Image (cartoon, coloured by chain):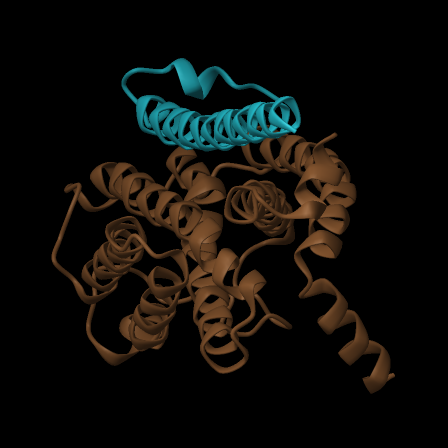
Amino acid sequence: MSLSFLLDPTGHGPFILASYGISFVVMAWIVLASAIRGSRVRREILSEIRARKGKS
Amino acid sequence: MWTLIKTSFHKLGSPPTFYAFAGTLVPWLALLTLGLMGYGLYGGLALAPADYQQGEGFRIIYVHVPSAWMSLFVYVTMAVAGVVALIWRMKIAEVWITASAPLGASFTFLALVTGSLWGKPMWGTYWVWDARLTSELVLLFLYLGVIALNAAIEDRRTAARACALLAIVGVVNIPIIHYSVEWWYTLHQGPIMANPANPTVHPDMLWPLLMMALAFNLFFFTLVLMRMRTELLDRERNSRWVEEALT
């Protein structure tokens, strides 16, 4: 087992690295974006609930 | 059996039940995704032998093919959800469309980019306007259309119905993408899994591909459930169940 082909600039290494790199960056970005939006929405709703309880 | 399926379907159609059910599933799906993706990556990059014609460059299929399959699968699920949303007015089906469109767009984008990166060393060019590539690009525009339509209409239920309609109309592109390599003479090769019982790929190369495909599928389900939970909270923020779920 050798992954040296990934580092060979004369072969297909750069194309393979770019493909896997872009794929995992995009997937990580969508995971992060979803998690951040989820936590922002929860925070907003919690502060609305606290505000409602404070008024009553 | 039918009654059980029908009852579960109706129960899961209720936002509080769905929210709790999805919350239980997400961590397990995420763990399975990580495990399968790890195995698929190891198999694809380390265990599978180099292709006798394409050399090491063929390993791009382990991200390209699952992305391409997912781009079609996600759109079909959106169209089915669209039918359910329009006929039965189920909120969960509407939320499914909204939550999965950005994921489908990402898979389509990845299929196009990784395909281009494979095309350069194999075909000598990043892009050709052949039927498969062009119809896949049309699919990306359809996804972007659904996302834009959802963002453009203020009333959420109206937006969801418009998106459902676009998803249903756009599904006509799916068989065009799938059969493009058979209907037209294209630079893109034919299907490698046309007959699953007798694949044209050696098992050492095929297994990592199937594992990666399953991992991408689970990744989608993990993410879509996460996003649907957020969307449901956002839509129903003034409901009693949201207050109970968050406090």
Q: What is the letter of the brown chain? A: B
Residue, x 24% and y 51% (percent of image)?
Answer: B152
A22 horizontally vs B15: left or right:
left
How many labels sit on residues?
0
Pick the residue in front: B134 or B234: B234
Query: Residue B80 placed where, x, y %?
Result: 49, 73
Q: Is residue B88 above or below residue B161?
A: below
B33 horizontally vs A24: left or right:
right
Q: Where on the picture, by quarter, is residue B88?
A: bottom right
Q: Is residue B84 above or below residue B203?
A: below
Residue, x 63% and y 50% (percent of image)?
Answer: B214
Residue, x 65% and y 30% (percent of image)?
Answer: B38
Q: What is the letter of the cyan chain? A: A
Query: Residue A25 placed where, x, y %?
Result: 42, 25
Q: Quadrant of the N terminus of chain B?
A: bottom right
Q: Residue furthest left?
A: B129
Q: Is residue B187 above or below residue B224?
A: below
Pick the residue in front: B145 or B115: B145
Q: Residue furthest front?
A: A56
Residue, x 67% and y 38% (percent of image)?
Answer: B33
Query: Residue B218 placed where, x, y %?
Result: 63, 47
Q: Is residue A20 above or below residue B17?
A: above
Q: Quadrant of the C terminus of chain B?
A: top right
